[in-house]
Image (cartoon, rainbow, N blue to C red):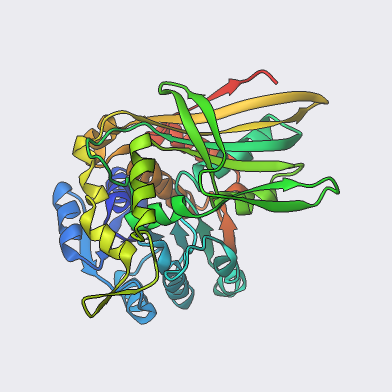
Amino acid sequence: MKRTLIIGAGGVGRVVVHKCVQNADIFGKITLASRTIGKCEEIKNELPNADIEIRTVDADNTEALIELIQNSDADIVINVALPYQDLTIMDACIATKTPYLDTANYEHPDEAKFEYKEQWARDEQFKEAGIIGLLGSGFDPGVTNVFCAYAQKHYFDEIHTIDILDCNAGDHGYAFATNFNPEINLREVSANGRYWQKNEDGVGEWIETKPMEIKMLWDYPQVGEQDSYLLYHEEMESLVKHIKGLKRIRFFMTFSESYLTHMKCLENVGMLGIKPVMHKGVEIVPMEFLKTLLPDPASLGSRTKGKTNIGIVAEGIKKGKKRKVYIYQVSDHEKCYEEVKSQAVSYTTGVPAMIGAKLILEEKWSGEGVFNMEEFNPDLFMEELNLQGLPWQIEELEV
């Protein structure tokens, strides 16, 4: 029987556990570990008939992680902890020769920097250990990468432009809250935007923009027209390496006026700072303090209504003719909560994490080294999306 170790017991961790239990014939015995044992207990109690062991772990401590992996006798480690902890968990997997999967790239805790550089640098170590490391098996990154690979395989000879479009039209009733970890969310949104394109000489380069500087209106199926803002997002970093013929790639996300107003106010008074400041003789990090004041994203599930729509628009050439394709997935917050006690943002991240791990355990996606999602056969993943609760659609658009 397989043994699965899941590290992280937040909203996404809850979804991963529920979906692994639904596929118990693949995942077998589950060990769920977190710094906070109470969160693990809560999830375990939701699934009283499942074979789940719970443990505490400091995911910043590589030696503690090695001990956890060895004691759980894990066949795979699913990392849904904080992105700050990717490297320690990867190093523990190398030491124990255990396959690894995460949903977001490494982020340095002391600077708003999102990149795969330090994870890709471990490729040789993963090869020497004879194991696979699958990066970014969430939705974006993750499913959006697979959508691009699927479009490349079946709809285009060359893809010239890609726009990744992420819409969350959910309403949780709060004036201001974040749908996933506040530190990660606010750092991502408040950072400068970036997109990649080839210049007149055919050389690819990153173009930097001010936060929220570029906006477009997009009509999202089952949601409607929404203002969408250009951000930097990590999947672009790998897609520029693997999509042939690419000339430009951008990422857009929707935000409500209330969210943007609150974020701007917080930024203006320094509450989005990630450097320590002194407060009454005590050193605090403003962003970390703000996190304690905001609603826990895991608590939003029961009160969130509405839908998400995440997808890609790819334009290019097929048999000498221009073509434009829109691949997207729509999820309903309330239906997600009914199934796994989490809202759609966690659901759309947790389900792909389970699918990636499933394909690894079934040896349908295999290899030695560190990989991004678009490097494998997309058909297998696309089939699983339909089976596991994330059905997708394709539309041909006018060029």
Pick out the residue farthest to the front.
268
Q: Is residue 204 visible?
A: yes
Vertical placement of 292 versus 275: above or below?
above
Q: Is residue 368 visible?
A: no
User: Which quarter of the figure is the C terminus placed in?
Assistant: top right
User: Which quarter of the figure is the N terminus placed in?
Assistant: bottom left
Q: Is residue 386 left or right of residue 316?
A: left
Pick out the residue farthest to the top.
398
**Which residue occupies 20% across, 59% down?**
40
Q: Is residue 216 left or right of residue 248?
A: left
**Which residue occupies 13% across, 51% down?**
45
Q: Position of residue 30 (x, y in %)?
A: 28, 58
Q: Position of residue 142 (x, y in %)?
A: 50, 47
Tell which of 127 and 221 is nearer to you: 221
Vertical placement of 70 versus 299: above or below?
below
Tell which of 164 and 97 is nearer to you: 164
Location of residue 334 (image quadrant): top left
Q: Position of residue 177 (x, y in %)?
A: 28, 45
Q: Is residue 250 left or right of residue 110?
A: right
Q: Position of residue 326 (x, y in %)?
A: 58, 27
Tell which of 364 and 295 is nearer to you: 295
Location of residue 248 (image quadrant): top right
Q: How many marks?
A: 0
Vertical placement of 306 versus 19: above or below?
above
Location of residue 368 (image quadrant): bottom right
